[in-house]
Image: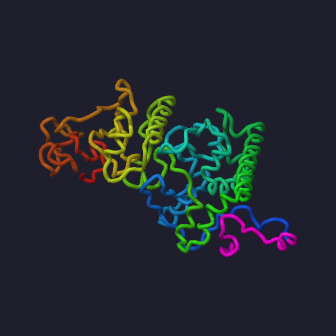
Amino acid sequence: MLACNTFGSILAPLQAEDERRKIPQPLYLMSLVCRPGHYVREKVKSKFDVPNGLTEEYILKSRYGRHEDADIFDTLQEYWHDWRAFGGHLYKNQDLFPWDCTEAYGSYPTKCNDCNIAKHVWNFPFDAWSIIPLHLQKDISLYPPATQGKSQLTSQQWMRNRLNILLAYEALSEGALAMAQTPEFRQATNWLHIQQDPTKDRLKLGGIHRAQPFSHHFEPGRDETSYIAAWAHLRFDDQVAAYEKLRDIRINLSDVGGSSPSAAIDDISGADFGTLGMGWLGMDLMVDGYVGDDCDPALVDPGDCEGPADAGAGDTPGGSDNGDTGGDSGGGDSAGCGSAGCGSAGCAGRGCGGCGCGF
């Protein structure tokens, strides 16, 4: 399709003086073309690694056996409308570019909704450039109505939609032009073109470490809690507060974390890290005290709980007070809970909100 030898450099090579007389402009400003073999799942171990971008994750799902019926834009919209149960996007610019541009690990102080369109799209330049052509092909009927009771966008909303797409494209193009004309940037990125490992080409396609909860594929892929948000049953304002609480915790983390959660816990001044849900923590950060999502004290006020916040040892769901669970694990032992019983600090049974994996 596109020749890697011609378009492989992220910036067009500078032309000699005699060549510039024949062709007074570069062949292109910025290229994100990668060599064959670059489609790999990035193993993120620290904040200095470049996680897979949104389009990368979308393509990798198909490559590894999960086929999406919707395009990349509609798939990203599902996060806000369906899985996180908001019924729509929360902040400006998300109606066209459905991600939270807030950066994790203290990388940048500006949060989504306080950003401008340039910051929002340049946090994911490959994804933004990929989505813009989709928008330009979409009819007004293919966008959800922005006003309750309307069947589609109004004429003014449709005009604003088209103008914001052009503003985003302008921000990307002006940024690419500035980078192409900056010698220091050209020198700093030249190694990416001449290095021999094709899997490193994908660094051009990545984006920021998102503070957006449950959004990287390497987080929800580790367990079974990544279906619908724990705050789905709350009022809308409480849903947003729960979302932003998790997001702020990720902002204040110092790094991705490793096999021990202690360093991550120490970074969260006063927050009960163990009750935030394993779908966001990942198994490496599962800690004592997780009580499940039905009455998560990190997200729900005690008076709003719709179920018991915890279960004492031997009081497993469906069982009796004498510890008879009806299973083969013995008195008071739910699956994966060990000898201490359901509700203990080390419990990971499904009945207590754990993964059932026997930690």
On the rendered image, what quadrant is the N terminus found in? bottom right
| Left or right, 204 with reference to 248 | right
**Residue 247 % position (x, y):** 47, 39
Identify whether 63 is placed above or below 72: below
The residue at 34%/38% (across/down) is 275
| Left or right, 245 with reference to 356 | right
Identify the image's colour scheme: rainbow, by chain, secondary structure or one colour.
Answer: rainbow
The residue at 67%/62% (across/down) is 186
**Residue 290 % position (x, y):** 30, 40
The residue at 44%/55% (across/down) is 218
**Residue 220 % position (x, y):** 42, 51
Identify whether 161 is placed above or below 17: above
**Quadrant assignment, res 254:** top left
| Left or right, 242 with reference to 138 | left
- Most foreground residue, 83 or 120: 120
Q: Is residue 15 magenta?
A: yes
| Residues in magenta, as a range | 1-22
- Most foreground residue, 134 or 330: 134
Residue 80 appears in the rendering: no
Identify whether 334 is placed above or below 270: below
**Residue 280 % position (x, y):** 41, 46
Identify whether 292 is placed above or below 359: above
Residue 180 appears in the rendering: yes
